[in-house]
Amino acid sequence: MFGLGTPELIVILAIAFLVFGGKKLPEIGSGLGKAISSFKNGLRDVEQSGKGIINDIPGVKEAVEVKAQVDKVKNMGNIENVLK
């Protein structure tokens, strides 16, 4: 984890405790967790909308199907070469 060991993490937590105090640390941790969760959800939404846009472009589905067929034929050729 970024090259940090247990002693380094303990020192960082001790400094955070001294700076923010015991009452603020749970609030900060909770806020940080919510922010990370929100960021991950946003990334997931962007990825899904990107896939939706690509699928809506004319010809993309057909191109994907053709590629799958070509890959299937290539794999058949590789299997025949292995059996010889």
Image (cartoon, rainbow, N blue to C red):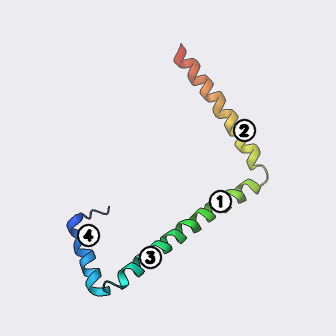
How far is mark 4 from mark 2, CA to CA?
53 Å
Task: Look at mark 4 in the image and give the residue it sits on.
Answer: 9
Q: CA distance from mark 4 to mark 3?
A: 18 Å
Q: Which residue is mark 2?
A: 66
Q: CA distance from mark 1 to mark 3?
A: 27 Å
- Give the amino acid at mark 1: Gln
Q: Amino acid at mark 2?
A: Val
For the N terminus, which image quadrant? bottom left
Closer to viewer: mark 4 or mark 2:
4
Q: Which mark is residue 48?
A: 1
Labels 4 & 1 near each other (Cβ < 8 A): no
Q: Position of residue 49 (x, y in %)?
A: 67, 62
Report the disc number at residue 29. Answer: none
Q: How many marks?
A: 4
- Where is residue 12 shown, x and y percent of the image? 26, 75
Query: Does label 1 or label 2 sit earlier along the sequence?
Result: 1
At 57% from the left edge and 66% from the top edge, which residue is drawn? 41
Judge left or right: residue 35 versus residue 21: right
